[in-house]
Amino acid sequence: MKNYRMFTLFLISAGITLLALVFILRPNSSADAPTSPQSISGMENMTLEPSKNAPMPANATRVPAQPQQNAVSRDELLTQINHYRQKAQEQFPLIQAGWYHSTWTVDNAVGGGSMPNGEPIPAQYTSESWYYVDDKGMVIRVITLMKTPEGKVFQAGVIDGGKGRNSAFSEVTDNKPYPFTDLLNGGYDEIKSNADLIPAALREVADRVEISFVEAYQQPVKMVGLDQEIIQSEIRFTIDPNTGLVTKREVLSTFVDGAQRVMMSNAFSPLTAVAQPTDEALAWYVDLRKK
């Protein structure tokens, strides 16, 4: 299995993140691929196979679309996201070492695919992560629990001592410590990656900032599990203007009849300092450390 640090749920291929319609995690095999809010969910060691439920057809030809409303130039967009990125950094000065906690919720319209051990991934699930940061601002320990809506853990992973262990497969992977700031930058790195290739729209309202990128398909695309063909896809990021954190990432599809549907939604909770992980998380940590 490839060594990797997974800061991207969103399947970036040649920088075009709307291939996210594949809807599943995988190791990032491109050295140039950007990182993303996957980090906030703590999925550094969650290796999942590409979904066989909703593969993107090989002949799908994507064309960047100009925004019909709220268009923003690339330079203006980068100025804006740098402002919010800096605000996010200011929220976490890391005065002292300790544990931080965050959750990440997924709602997938067409199913979640399967894990390496063959077990299905729920269409809706929540990932809880705990990160231990040392006095140099490096994440040296991670515990992640992926749970069904009923609260059952269907996959768990830990990183400690530079090694990653996962309940879904037996191989131990190399996972070096990384800066805590990586947990804050991922969403912005993906936004910038899109902005390099696709015209952006930016909408500011009282409690959020929305940034969108749209791609059209030259021919309608048939996705397994959907009744209609898709003619356009949009990826939309939501930023909390008060904290500067990316709080949501959505993939929306427009069908041949003009209807639009949210195909995948990822909601991220703010990182919060905690005394220690829950007893459940610590039990998984102890168990997986034995592998």
Image: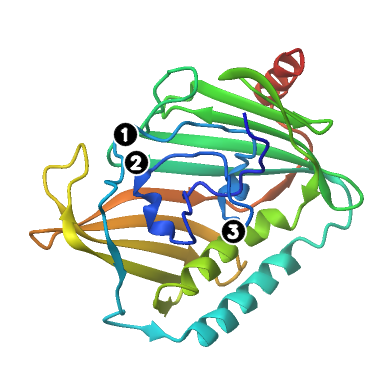
Residue under label 3, please give it. 34
Q: Amino acid at mark 1?
A: Gly
Q: For the point 66% across and 59% down, which residue is it?
A: 184
Question: Which residue is nearer to you in this view: 177 or 139?
Answer: 177
In screen coordinates, is 94 left or right of 217? right
Gap in angstroms between the C-alphas marked 1 and 2: 6 Å
**Which image quadrant for residue 258?**
bottom left
For the N terminus, give its image quadrant: top right
Residue at the limit of the structure toward the front, as seen here: 59
Dot 1 lies on which element?
A: loop
Q: Which mark is residue 170?
A: none
Label 1 close to label 2 by CB (< 8 Å): yes
Instruction: Give the number of marks.
Output: 3
Q: Amino acid at mark 3?
A: Pro
Q: Which mark is residue 111?
A: 1
Q: For the point 39% across and 78% down, which residue is it?
A: 199
Q: How is this picture coloured? A: rainbow
Dot 2 lies on which element?
A: strand
Percent coordinates x, y for residue 115 in the rendering: 46, 25
Label 3 close to label 2 by CB (< 8 Å): no
Q: Which-is-in-front pick, marks 3 and 1? A: 3
Percent coordinates x, y for residue 286 in the rendering: 75, 17
Disc 3 crowd, CA 10 A, few/some/many (<14, 14-19, 20+): many
Residue under label 2, please give it. 108
For the C terminus, give its image quadrant: top right
Question: Which residue is nearer to you in this view: 7 or 209?
Answer: 7
Q: For the point 64% across and 27% down, which residue is it?
A: 157
Mark 3 vs 2, N-terminal side: 3
